[in-house]
Amino acid sequence: SPVASLAAGGLAGAATWATCLPLDAVKTHYQSDVAHRTYRGACRAIFRASGVGGFFAGFWTMVLGGVPRDAACFAGTEAAQRALALRRMPQAASTAARIGFEPRNS
């Protein structure tokens, strides 16, 4: 259903940001400050300055922007796949009948 697709896309988007944001925070600190010569040094600096929460700075901003986008993208992809499958089904059914394929009842 469209609601399920929207929910699945939104949850997938939030999970993506929760996973990637700490890595992105380290990368951004590493690139923006010449004092951080290693990624480990960038991690230490973030942790010393802000604790674990420093790795998730901006999380809610990303979620508020990303979740609706990801939900719409996922639902749109699902709808397009359904629409294309409906257009191909008559041809697939006639091809299956021609080669003697009988679908199983499940």
Image: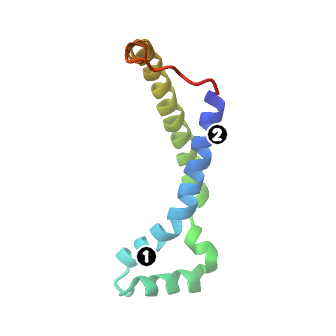
Quarter-wise, where is residue 84 in the image? top left
Chain-order first, disc 2 or disc 1: 2
Viewer-proximal residue among 99 and 92: 99
Q: Quadrant of the N terminus?
A: top right
Image position, residue 39 (x, y; %): 41, 82
Residue 80 visible from this viewpoint: yes
- Does residue 84 appear to the left or right of 63 in the view shown? left
Q: Amino acid at mark 1?
A: His
Task: Give the SS element for disc 2.
Answer: helix
Q: Please tell me which residue is depicted at 58% across the width and 61% down the height of the picture.
A: 18
User: Residue 29, labelled with which disc?
Assistant: 1
Task: Give the SS element for disc 1.
Answer: helix
Image position, residue 55 (x, y; %): 56, 72
Image position, residue 7 (x, y; %): 64, 39
Q: Please tell me which residue is depicted at 45% across the width and 67% down the height of the picture.
A: 24
Q: CA distance from mark 2 to mark 1?
A: 33 Å
Q: Amino acid at mark 2?
A: Ala
